[in-house]
Image (cartoon, rainbow, N blue to C red):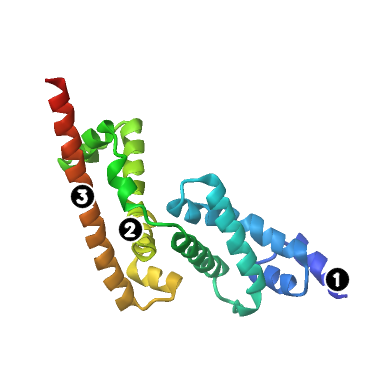
Amino acid sequence: MQARMQIDAKWLSPTDDELVELSLTGDGDAFEQLVRRYSKRMLDIAGSFFRQRDMREDVVQEAFAKAYFSLNTYHKGERFDRWLARITVNACYDQLRRMKRRPEYVFSEMTEDEATWLEEVTCGYATELHVDKERKEAAKELADMLLASLSADDRLVIILLEREELSVAEIAELTGWSKAKVKIKAFRARQAMRRALDRMTAQAERLRRKARGGKK
């Protein structure tokens, strides 16, 4: 009878709660449906943190594994996508902490083209809607370089605030931090980002001066 109920549930496009319940009974197919249902969303979250495809996939695989072994902590009626998003964000956070900060890389490997772009963006030119694809890509690369110089906590907060466009309350829910803690971390992260941008701008100026001197 129980097996028949499982089969019927699958054919009727079961809800997340039903799939979780079936998964807890050892039904591997039910969890596979959850994986297919939410893989794209989890990859999108990981993509906000990591540009490398293999890293995104590794983090998502780790998150799904953690979710599977934590299914008994999921409360029926809770939004499964939010529960899964919390696990994914924490998996991204763990990966960020495993990665080394690279402040020296940010400032020593800037190219002359990147320096020129940075000069324009600080003047506001690159915020126009007609910015071409190449400059948008350069902007993203520079943003990633800036983020690479920050601590794991700072990167997490900046990415959730700016790329995911989450509110303080939503970040608190995802991370398990209090709203006050999120606000403090956000303030400190933005300060750190500002300092990193100032150092990068100074490096860009030195590169441009060196380039002008070499042309004389």
Q: Amino acid at mark 3?
A: Arg
**Figure check: 66 above or below 112:** below
Confirm or deny contact between disc 1 and disc 2 (CB under 8 A). no
Q: Give the mark, 2 or 3, whose residue is nearer the N terminus.
A: 2
Which quadrant holds residue 211? Answer: top left
Q: Position of residue 216 (x, y in %)?
A: 11, 20
For marks 1 and 2 on the same chain, the one whose residue lies earlier in the sequence: 1
- The secondary structure type at the circle numbered 2 is loop
The amino acid on which the numbered mark 1 sits, given as a three-letter code, is Ala
At label 1, counting other C-alpha atoms closer than 10 Å, the crowd grade (few under 14, some 14-19, many 20 or more) is: few
Image position of 174 with respect to 207: above or below: below
Q: Residue 46 bears which disc, if any? A: none
Query: Which residue corresponds to the image point at 22% horizontal and 61% vertical from the top-left?
Result: 191
Which element carries disc 3, helix, strand or loop?
helix
- Residue 131, given in percent of the width and then of the height, sits at 28, 33
Q: Secondary structure at mark 1?
A: helix
